[in-house]
Image (tube, coloured by chain):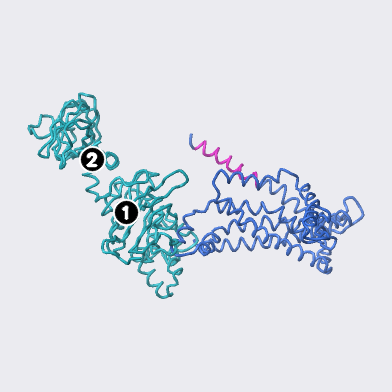
Amino acid sequence: MSAVTSRRGDIWQRFAVAIPYLWLLVFFLAPFAIILKISVADPVMAQPPFTPAFDDAGGLQISADNYAFLLTDKLYAITYLKSVLMALSATALCLLLGFPIAYGIARAESATRNILLLLIVLPFWISFLLRVYAWMGLLNNYGVINNLLMWLGITEQPIPMMYTDFAIYIGLVYSYLPFMILPLYATLERMNLDLVEAAQDLGATSSRAFWDITWPLARPGVIAGSLLVFIPATGEYVIPYLLGGPESLLIGRVLFDEFFVNRDWPLASAVAIVLVVLVVIPIVLLQRYQAKAAEQTA
Amino acid sequence: MTGKDDDKSFIEVRELSKHFGEFVAVDAVDLRIERGELFSILGGSGCGKTTLLRMLAGFETPTSGRIFLDGVDITDQPPYERPVNMMFQSYAVFPHMTVEQNISYGLQKERVPQNEIASRVGEMLALVKLEDYASRKPDQLSGGQRQRVALARALVKKPKVLLLDEPLAALDRKLREHTQFELMNIQDELGITFVVVTHDQEEAMILSNRIAVMEQGRFEQIGTPKEIYEFPCNRFVADFIGTINTFEGVVQTSGEGTITVASDECGHSLRAYCDTPPRNGSDICLAVRPEKIYISQTEPDNDDDSCLRGVIEDFGYFGNLSLYRIRLQTGKIVQVSAQNRRRSTERFLEWDDQVFISWRPRSAVVLEN
């Protein structure tokens, strides 16, 4: 009897494990393979606008021309670099703002804690696009913020904020802050408060105890939050498009333009593949580092 | 201010209170603990014992009152400046540090020279028998080992006082017994004053030189384990420590130390010895421990003893002793425990057996209402 149930349990267990694999296969790996395939094709004026992988004779026709082009044209390298740097800065800003917020929530009374968490999640009830549009209204030359500053007499002329890198940072930090706060909150909330008191008891001041105990123990949350902000921020399209100026060309915009304006699908695909590689490298390095750390303790 | 007075105790707590809003956790308590004592604060949950300990450690600011340690007022000192260390109930061993790093942490904060740190940490590792585990991380240790890391980490600082919050609560029974004696040995060896907070009376009885029984933010009684057990000063303490039978009654004759008490509850008059006899006619309560009561099938012939008749309602066999619940004719239940001296598979007493229970006048505690 028990053998039967356990075998049945086994099947269900396998099934349950198979679902996420299947999901990743169908919705991640397969599209990735398609994009990879397109990136090594040549653009043609046809439907679809790229050459097939095999020619009529059945020979393989692929080329690395698109990747070579990305390397030769400096514009792409600069754009990638700028996107990564901007995402890194936005991640740092999110961490700087998010850590105290997450810490505050984790240490709040449980009743207030739920309200505070709700406030963090509440903006998701409104469409992301609408929220970015709202920032346009706030940051405009005659928007809410400038009007207020002029009315207060702090400035006579409106301060240009829209269509600058500053506006992009506002947009990125505003949009991705919850993704930093939530994993940080999860790690901080689980932390045993006795640990901090024990450090103080052993002679550490409050700030020393923070750097010796709280910060290293919060590292998993810091890493998770940073990845959740950094990865989408690198390829972000909507925020720089709506809030940024024409000179703030980021890789998401380049990708969009190659795809929809130039209709050069193969080049756009190559741009996307390089972007994925750029984002994956830090994750792989990080995982290696964590595996090593785990090995050392074992 | 004056220096050290001769009549000052090592730890002196004066009129110490802690209020959390409306709630009074600690209510103007006074406490004196001598150097080298192993002192326990015993009480149920919410009695204020942990708050008191946290005030000694510096984690809670008292609402009023002062704390003196070795003649110095430490009330306003932050935890990291007090010559006091604490062993937390959760042990609070730093999970990201090795055993060695955990133990050396406090010395590093004190800026003790490196070579001295190494030798003191080595000594501590030997003391708690963890030399072979120095480079392990806490998640590779058992509960008992973690507890020893927490102990070593606090002791390595050579504190004037070590505070222990429920030191044995997280250990299983066998390990507790072993650890109890280990703690006592270490305390004896180092001569450091220990203040233990516990809800476990057995733990407090075995460990301590003196016990303070705490309830609703106040001390009910402070004394040696023997005093607390044999001479509880009120009904709460009598009831809280161990099991006790109580008989309500009215004093009939009083004099020469021995009093007679008429007790409607057991339908009989009882005798008790008392240094300061209460007045005739006053309502009192006699308390008798189960192990002070004799149980027999024939009527004992000592007139001095209090003797009652009853039937065995229930009994439990514990190996070394048996516990009987005896129903008196009035319906009152009395608990009696007896050593199982004879080795036999046959039962000495059975359900519904008629028995006599008796105790000496000096075995009963007189508690005035």
A16 up-or-down from A81: above or below: above
| Residue linked to disc 2 | B319
Query: Which three-letter amino acid code belongs to the residue tagged 2?
Result: Gly
Q: Colour of chain B?
A: cyan
Q: Quadrant of the C terminus of chain B?
A: top left
- Chain letter for mark 2, please: B
**Residue A53 appears in the picture as rendered:** no
Secondary structure beneath dot 1 equals: strand
Task: Report the magenta stretch's main SS.
Answer: helix
B296 up-or-down from A18: above or below: above
* Local crowd size for mark 1, using a 10 Å CA cut-off: few (<14), some (14–19), many (≥20): some
The x and y percentages for residue B277 are 16, 39
Q: Is residue B303 left or right of residue A149?
A: left
The x and y percentages for residue B215 are 34, 44
Compare marks 2 and 1 and give the one earlier in the sequence. Answer: 1
The x and y percentages for residue A25 are 70, 49
Q: Is residue B325 magenta?
A: no
| Residue linked to disc 1 | B31
Q: Colour of chain A?
A: blue
Picture quadrant where residue B271 is located: top left
Q: How far is disc 2 from disc 1 in space, using C-alphas?
A: 41 Å
Q: Nearer the viewer, residue B217 or B247?
A: B217
Q: Which residues are magenta?
A: A3-20
